[in-house]
Structures are given as structure tokens and as C-alpha cells.
Image: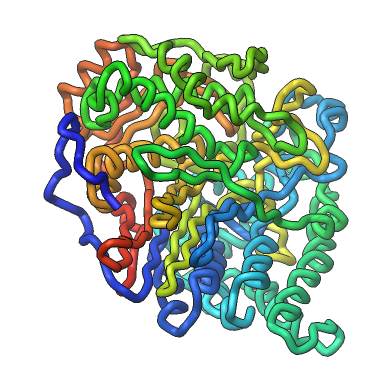
Amino acid sequence: MTADSPSPAFTPAPSDRTRPELRGTFGMAASTHWLATGTAQSVLERGGTAVDAAVAAAFVLHVVEPHLNGPGGDLTALVAPVGEHPFVLAGQGAAPAAATIERYRSLGLDEIPGAGPLAAAVPGSVVAWLHLLETRGTWELADVLAPALGYARDGHPVHESVVRVITAVAPLFEAHWPTSAAQWMPGGKIPEPGDMITNEPWAAVLARLMGAGEAPSSGAGSSRESRVRAAIDWWNREVGASVEEFVREPVQHSLGGALPGVVTAADLAAYAPAEEAPVALTFRGVEVVKAGPWSQGPVLLQALAILEARVATHGDAVLDPSTALGVHTITEALKLALADRDAWYGDPAQTDVPLAELLSASYAAERAALIGETASREVRPGHPGGRSPWMPPVRSPGDTAATPLPGSGEPTLDRAGRQRGDTCHLDVVDRYGTMISATPSGGWLQSSPTIPALGFCLGTRLQMAWLDEDAPSRLEPGIRPRSTLSPTMLVRDGRVIEALGTPGGDQQDQWQLLYLLRRLVGGYEPQQAIDAPMFHTDAMVASFEPRTVQPASLTVEARLGDSVIDELRGRGHEVTVMGPWSLGRLSCVGVDPERGWFYAAANSRGAQGYAAGR
């Protein structure tokens, strides 16, 4: 699924690739860790569907990328059963019942901490995956969880990126979070890359989940669905009780001293994942499908609309991510879309998001007219429908007096351009054509103290909410904080043809935008588009602590080239040059309807992501 004819205004796709273009007729999987990809493909090989494969791979990601996601975290997924339009699986937990602005302000907080149990939304990942297995899967729960149980109980070789994160947060664990030190530094020793590590408490939880539906007292009955439902009920009851007991004790938070959390067993019992209609925008004959404005997904659609409006007066040359003109124009469009994200996006249950106006052609043209020849240094949300935007605090990095904990904030590139980690992503397509694109995150090992009875910690998604009654994404019980998790699907002529995504926090839709421009306008093949030089801006209010803005920032891979970088600096961009292969962790799967084969591609950066298929 490339452009019908590559735009002559685009830099031609390079002939070299870091990986082969995978094509076949059976099924494909791609993810940010080879063990998850291998697990998904093994399920497909044994007759499982894309749903069975994705759920199995997701539980493996909890074990093998614990610094990037965990059972206490969340997920956003797009699911496209064969012959159906995609739906959104919203595995984003809401704010606990006791999480009120008044309560947090009474603790002396002006913002929600970026680490510790006070930053925890209700865990959504496990229940969301089990819900999908119950309603759309075909395999028994025990078979789906078996690979993850094996890696947790018997061990797996730890990746160097996990070791790097444990090393960075070791002083925090030793001084304040002893349960985390016990799990991740057994005997006081940081593991070496390649060491076999285990998580016995989590293995025990997985084993109990597997057995919950089989217990005579469960009332599970004879159906597969009822057995999975029994496991969900066990999770809500037993895991909820362990979470509530643990968070009662005060622990060190970022910016807030030692404080207890507010999540209760009742919060977990009340949680249910949602299946929702997506939002979409047609660009160059392809319907680009995203989650709603409780995520940042519409940012990608807004940026595409703004850029298409710019093309109307300046031509396709402004869309090329390999030239100074293209990088400048794309960056400025992203700044405008991200400013709207911070001013307008939120859970529709809480906020009247003017999404139709934000995605309209007339509004896009109005925003495109703001793009000048030099880098803007303003945060400029728009006025859709004549409404006045809410303005978040606009602070530079030097304006934050407090020093956050080493584990706080976002597990990705920090604002100095250093690589800290990332989130996770997986894509699967089965032989029938069912596709899934999912971005699991949260509950990473450095976000909160490990709950020793469970082997995992709580996530920190609440840090994206504001302690301001006027904010569109304000802290409120039962409301989802506006998430960064943002998978994508592509639909042409009514058929789903591709699933893609990337980790990266505030960068997720930025990197995906570059991929789509190269695919849909430049005619690149998937691996070519993934391999091509990436860039992003931090000229928006960060979703993670510390929530600062760098108005003219532009972070680029060195492969963009000296002449392009020099011209961007001449246009006023404050360019940070990263290593030649350092930005983005995209993967994708898809189907070519005309030629009848499936395809997959994965990022080679970091030597961790892989695609597989046949």
C-alpha cells in the first residue's frame, strides 16, 4: 500500500534497507521485542487468530519489557475483525474515586507527581486484554498465558535497555523503594545484560489467573468465554485487594515526599474497558483511523489536514521529511496540532471536545496560514467554532524548581535528547485478514514501588491530568486522563489494509506522520519508510513530568544531513542532533489487496524490534 504514483516533489526512497520487506500469505506479526513477535507468530502457526496472538504477545511484553510497560499499566488498541471497520479497545483506566483536585491540593501539590502511587490511574491493561480474548478470541486463557508464565517463572535473558534503566533508578530503589530493589536487584546486585531474570510473584499471579476459570467454585461453566470471565473476576477481586493494602502505606513520590496512594479494590472492581468508534480523516485516498480525543490520536489527523491545506498553495514539496522545507513545514504543522491537543483534548465524558471543527478543512486552512518561513516560538492553540482555548502553563525547563525522582515522567527521550527507554507496540494480521495495532504502556518498573505480592507496580498516567477545574483533561474521579498512546490503522475502499504504531510518548504521532507522508505521498515501502531519518519537536506542553515547553526545539537524526540541519537552524529552529539511528520504534503489518499478500516491517533502531511472518 504505497502511493499510487510517488510524488515527483519527494526525495526518492533509498534502495538500501536495514531489514528485508517481509511478504507472505499466512500471517504476520511485528513488535518492539523479538520474544513478543516470536510468541505472536507461534500462536498464528498453531491455528490461533490475530486476537489470540496479540494477547499472548502483550503478556510477554509485560515480562520482557518491564521498564516500558507492565500489568499495572494501560493500553490503546485498534482492532479490525475481518470484514469489519476498526474499533477502539480503550484499555486506559480512569482516575480512582478518591482522586480529586481538592484532595491532591490539600497535600500541597500543584501538579500530579510523575512517579509514585498518587500518579496511578486504575490498571487497565490486563482486564482489557482479557476482555478482548473473551469477546473476540478463540484460544483458552491457559494457552494464551503460557509463554508469559514461562518467561516470568523460568526466566529470560534481560535486555541491556532494562539493565540501563535499573542502573539509573538503583539509588531510588535502595533509598526509598525496597520492594523494587528486592525484585530488580536481588541480593543488592544489578543484573548484567543477558542474565536470566525471573519474576516469581507475577508468575504466581499468572498461574492463578489461568486456574481461576477452572476452579469448581468459580461457576465458570463449560464455555471458553465464561472461563476467561472468571479470570477477570478473580483479578478484580484478589489483585484489587493487594493493591489497596499496599498503597495505604506512604512511599516516596516525585515532588511530594512520602504519601499514600488512593487506588482501592473498589476502583479495580468498577473498571471495564470500552469498545469505541474511532475517528478518521481521509488523506490521499486513504482513511487514517485513530482513537478519540481522550488519546492524542487526532493530532495526527489534524497535522495531515493542516499539511494538505498547505499543499494547496505550496505543492507537495512541503511534505517531504528529507528536506529543510519539508521538515520546517511539518514541524510547524505539528506545533499547531499539539497546541490544540493541550487546549482542547480530554475524555468526552468530561469535556465537550470540538473535534468536528478541529478536523474540518476550513479550520485546517486557517491553521495552515499561520505557518511562516521561520520557526514559531509561541504556543498557539486555535479557536474552533469561535471558542476560546484553555491555556496550560507554559514553562521552560529552567522554570521548574523541584527535582523529580529518577523514575518520574516519561520512559522515552528526555528533554535533553538522551535515550531513556520507550513504551511498547505490537501489530498482528492473521490469515483471515483480522488486524490489531496496540500500544501498551504504563506500570513500568521505575514508575512506582513494586507490590511484592503481585510482582508489578502501578502506572503513572494520572500525571497527564491537571489540578485545574478549567482544564479539558482535569483530575476527576472516573475520568480517563488524556493519554499519549496512539496506534493507527489505514483503510482503503472500505478494507483495512495496514496497522502501525510506535512507542514514544509525545513523539508517537510525530514519527507516524513522517512514516505516512513517505508511504502515501513519497511511495516508500514500509521498511524504507521506517528506516528513513526521523525528527520531532518538543514545542508543546509535555504530557509527562516535568511539564515544560521548548518552543523552537527540533530533535533530528544526524542522517538528515548537515546542509538540511544548517538551513533549519537558519530558519530559527533550535536543533538537537541525535545519533544516526536513534529516533522512533515503528512497526507495521498489512495486506496488499491487489496482489494478495501480507507484509510486515519493524524498526532496527535499538536492536530489539522484529517482524516475522510467512
- Closer to us: 355 or 91: 355
Residue 420: horizontal and vertical position, in percent? 45, 42
Q: Considering depth in this image, is 173 or 600 the residue closer to the camera?
A: 600
As drawn, is 460 to the left or to the right of 56? right
Q: Which of 314 and 185 is in front in this view?
A: 314
Farthest residue, direction left: 15
The answer to whether residue 495 is left or right of residue 514 is: right
Instruction: Name the quarter where the C terminus is drawn.
Output: bottom left
Return the residue found at the far front. Answer: 493
The answer to whether 465 is drawn above or below residue 457 in the figure is: above
- Tell me what residue is drawn at x 48 percent, y 67 percent: 434
Question: Picture coordinates of residue 531 (x, y %)?
Answer: 25, 47
**Would residue 583 be visible to someone looking at this image?**
no
Residue 395, above or below 76: above
Q: Is residue 239 above or below residue 174?
A: below
How is the model colour-coded? Answer: rainbow
Question: Depth check: 455 or 230 in front?
Answer: 230
Q: Is residue 535 visible?
A: yes
Residue occupying image coordinates x 25% and y 30%: 320
Residue at (45%, 51%) from the top-left corner?
489
Identify which residue is drawn at 65% across, 42% down: 461
Q: Position of residue 96 (x, y in %)?
A: 81, 45
Number of dots carrying numbers:
0
Residue 185 at what x, y percent from top left? Answer: 56, 59
